[in-house]
Image (tube, helix red, strand yellow):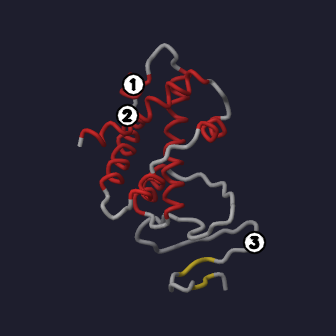
């Protein structure tokens, strides 16, 4: 039986096969999976998540590591999108490009709201907040982008960080 119960009474799937398929039926809401909860060994999972799922995990997951991963993946997804947009339109500044794209603008607004909510969350310690809100390093960004264009990276990084935290200080 792959369904197990841990010492806290929580149910989990114990998967030992390399490939595993799971079909869930008759659910009232779309499940959002939080992998490897309370698991500290280095494991790499390749899985493309919807940005909307990442926002839910970053806001509500009670596993700090998974919540931190969601924050990082949101940042990297937004960074990559802004970088590609700026690269394709070198004559325009990023702010004007974002203002023309409702979807990107909306995702940046959600990210800014998420940061504000996290900063204002009285249930989170300062240490946890600082871990959650730590932006990925340039090395991780370069690995994610697959290219190195320092001037464009700096432009993208400055825009994303400034636009994301601006609301925190205006609330």
Up-down relation of residue 90 to residue 117 (above or below):
above
Instruction: Compare marks 3 and 2 and give the one earlier in the sequence.
Output: 3
SS category of the residue bearing label 1: helix
Question: Quadrant of the image for the N terminus?
Answer: bottom right
Observer-nearest residue: 167 or 2?
167
Position above or below: 61 against 149: below
> Going by the image, does 53 lie left or right of 151?
left
Q: Residue at label 3?
A: 17
Structural distance between the alpha carbons of marks 1 and 2: 9 Å
Residue picked out by circle 1? 95
With respect to residue 1, does 79 lie above or below? above
> Residue 4's spot in the image, x, y percent?
61, 84
Disc 2 secondary structure class = helix
Quadrant location of the C terminus?
A: top left
Q: Residue at x 63, y 66 (%)?
A: 40
User: Residues at badges 1 and 2 in contact (C-beta under 8 Å)?
Assistant: yes
Q: Residue beneath label 2, please?
A: 163
Give how far across and how far down residue 50 sits, in percent: 51, 51
Give how far apart the Cα atoms at labels 1 and 3 are.
47 Å
Q: Point out residue 89 in the picture as x, y percentages from the top left corner.
A: 51, 19
Q: Which corner quadrant of the image does residue 148 belong to?
A: top right
């Amino acid at each position: 039986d792959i369904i197990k119960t841990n010492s806290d009474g929580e149910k989990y799937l114990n998967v030992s096969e390399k490939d595993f398929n799971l079909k869930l039926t008759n659910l009232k809401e779309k499940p959002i999976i939080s992998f490897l909860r309370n698991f500290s060994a280095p494991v790499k999972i390749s899985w493309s998540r919807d940005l909307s799922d990442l926002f839910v995990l970053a806001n509500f997951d009670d596993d700090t590591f998974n919540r931190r991963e969601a924050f990082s993946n949101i940042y990297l997804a937004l960074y990559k999108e802004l970088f590609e947009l700026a690269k394709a339109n070198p004559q325009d500044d990023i702010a004007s490009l974002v203002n023309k794209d409702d979807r990107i603008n909306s995702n940046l607004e959600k990210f800014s709201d998420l940061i504000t909510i996290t900063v204002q969350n009285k249930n989170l310690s300062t240490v946890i907040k600082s871990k959650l809100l730590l932006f990925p390093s340039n090395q991780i960004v370069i690995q994610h982008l697959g290219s190195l264009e320092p001037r464009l990276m700096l432009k993208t990084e400055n825009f994303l960080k400034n636009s994301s935290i601006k609301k925190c200080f205006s609330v």
